[in-house]
Amino acid sequence: MRPTLLAPLLVLGAAVLVAAKPPMRFQPDPSSVIAAEIAFSRLAQEKGQWTAFRDTAADDAVMVVPQRVLAKDWLKGRDDPPAPMNWSPSIVYVACDGNLAASTGNWSATDGSVGYFTTIWRRDKKGRWKWIFDHRAPLASPRAAPEFLTGKVATCKRPPRPDG
């Protein structure tokens, strides 16, 4: 290849590498998931239960109601109940790379029914938590509320160092 052609190609290649953004990295932060879960519950109180579910769901989110459904389809056109259920997280688990999380806690409805929920969260391209799976089940009696919220981070197995 001629040097006059090679130089511009090298400059172009270097420019592409400099302009390329590295993949977004997240810290495994349980507090951010707790905040997302609390904001989700507050949104349900302020705007309506199914409105909150629609606004915080990922496009591919799945719900169990009691059968498994694609949330977007199930929620489409669904009216909010007059009184939304209340819920709050008790414990949050976050993947070591900070991209996935699970939360579980208690819920209660105005009719006196109680239960527990499990929500799986995933970060979107902008780093916001969106839920991708939601399951709620009734209980005969409420679980004890925790004294404090717990956040746990998974440990990732690291590859061995090249020097031993």
Image: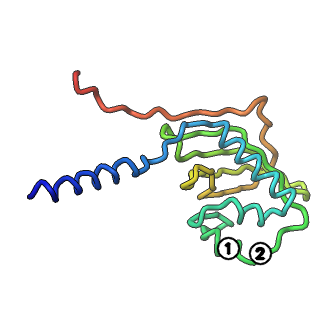
Q: Residue at x 78, y 29 (%)?
A: 147
Above or below for 156 versus 50: above
Instruction: Residue 88 in the image: state x and y as whole percent.
Output: 77, 45
In this view, the residue farthest toward the left is: 1
Instruction: Residue 39 in the image: state x and y as whole percent.
Output: 76, 49
Question: Which of the 4 quarters of the picture holds residue 144?
Answer: top right
In the rendered structure, find residue 78 and report the number of the disc placed on it.
2
CB under 8 Å between discs 2 and 1:
yes
The amino acid at mark 1 is Trp
Q: How is the image coloured?
A: rainbow
Q: Residue at x 68, y 66 (%)?
A: 65
Above or below for 3 versus 63: above
Q: In what quadrant of the picture does the C terminus appear? A: top left
User: Is 3 positioned to the left or the right of 137 in the image?
Assistant: left
Crowd around label 2: few <14 · some 14–19 · many ≥20 (10 Å): few
User: Is 151 positioned to the left or the right of 26 in the image?
Assistant: right
User: Is 67 positioned to the left or the right of 8 in the image?
Assistant: right
Instruction: Residue 67 in the image: state x and y as whole percent.
Output: 63, 69
Task: Give the CA separation, mark 2 to mark 1.
Answer: 8 Å
Task: Please state which of residues 91 and 164 is positioned toward the viewer in this rendering.
Answer: 164
Question: Which of the 4 quarters of the picture holds residue 158?
Answer: top left
What residue is shown with label 1? 74
Above or below for 69 versus 42: below
Instruction: Residue 93 in the image: state x and y as whole percent.
Output: 59, 39
The number of callouts visible is 2
Helix, strand or loop status at disc 2 = loop
Helix, strand or loop status at disc 1 = helix
In the rendered structure, find residue 31 and report the number of the disc placed on it.
none
